[in-house]
């Protein structure tokens, strides 16, 4: 069964950190780009970060640049999103996605597989 499973979400105070994981099963992430998206209540899903499958290309949304770090471990078939200096506006459900041929990294339709999402809440 092909699936992506996110973990690592939770409740954190402003200024805190979380590390999200995205574990793939049923297929190998080696040939897939990995992206993280988020969706806050009443808002559209937006791209947060992207890492390519091969050449190390990385993108970040402007709102998270300098605070979030995306990475991948192909040996573990897992992607990660390290989130530091979290702000209340980072509160959302975070989704990971895998795409075999991604032209526009922030395009939802570019990705073949999606996880079920993990809730991140930043609040004091």
Image (spheres, grey):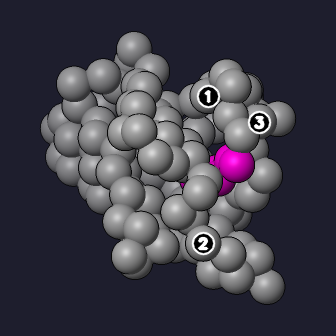
Q: Look at the image and say whether residue 75 sits in the magenta stretch.
A: no
Q: Are marks 3 and 1 in contact (CB under 8 Å)?
A: yes
Identified at 46% across, 34% down, the residue is: 49
Q: Calculate the distance from the C-alpha at mark 3 to the C-alpha at mark 1.
A: 7 Å
Specify start and end residues of the magenta stretch as a single range: 96-100
Identified at 51% across, 48% down, the residue is: 53
The first of marks 2 and 3 along the sequence is 2
Label 1 secondary element? loop
Q: Position of residue 78 (x, y in %)?
A: 45, 68
Q: Give the camera-side residue of 12 and 23.
A: 23
- Pointer 3 local density, CA inside 10 Å: few below 14, some 14–19, many at least 20: some
Q: Give the camera-side residue of 5 and 58.
A: 58
Observer-side mark, 1 or 2, equals 2
Identified at 37% across, 39% down, the residue is: 56
The first of marks 3 and 1 along the sequence is 1
Residue matched to label 3: 110
Q: Quadrant of the N terminus?
A: bottom right
Q: Position of residue 23 (x, y in %)?
A: 52, 72
- Residue 4 visible in the shown view: yes
* Image: 87 above or below 100: above
Q: Is 35 on the left-hand or right-hand side of 110?
A: left
Residue matched to label 2: 28
In the rendered structure, find residue 13 and report the number of the disc placed on it: none
Label 2 secondary element? loop
Residue matched to label 1: 105
Among the 4 quarters of the image, the one containing residue 55: top left
């Amino acid at each position: 069964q092909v699936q992506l499973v996110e973990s690592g979400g939770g409740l954190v105070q402003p200024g805190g950190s979380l590390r999200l994981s995205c574990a793939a099963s049923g297929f190998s992430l080696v040939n897939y780009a990995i992206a993280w998206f988020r969706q806050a209540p009443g808002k559209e899903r937006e791209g947060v970060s992207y890492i390519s499958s091969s050449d190390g290309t990385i993108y970040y949304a402007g709102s998270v640049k300098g605070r979030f770090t995306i990475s991948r471990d192909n040996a573990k078939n897992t992607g990660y999103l390290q989130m530091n200096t979290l702000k209340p506006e980072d509160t959302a459900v975070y989704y990971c996605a895998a795409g075999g041929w991604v032209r526009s990294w922030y395009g939802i339709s570019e990705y073949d597989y999606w996880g079920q999402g993990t809730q991140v809440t930043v609040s004091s």
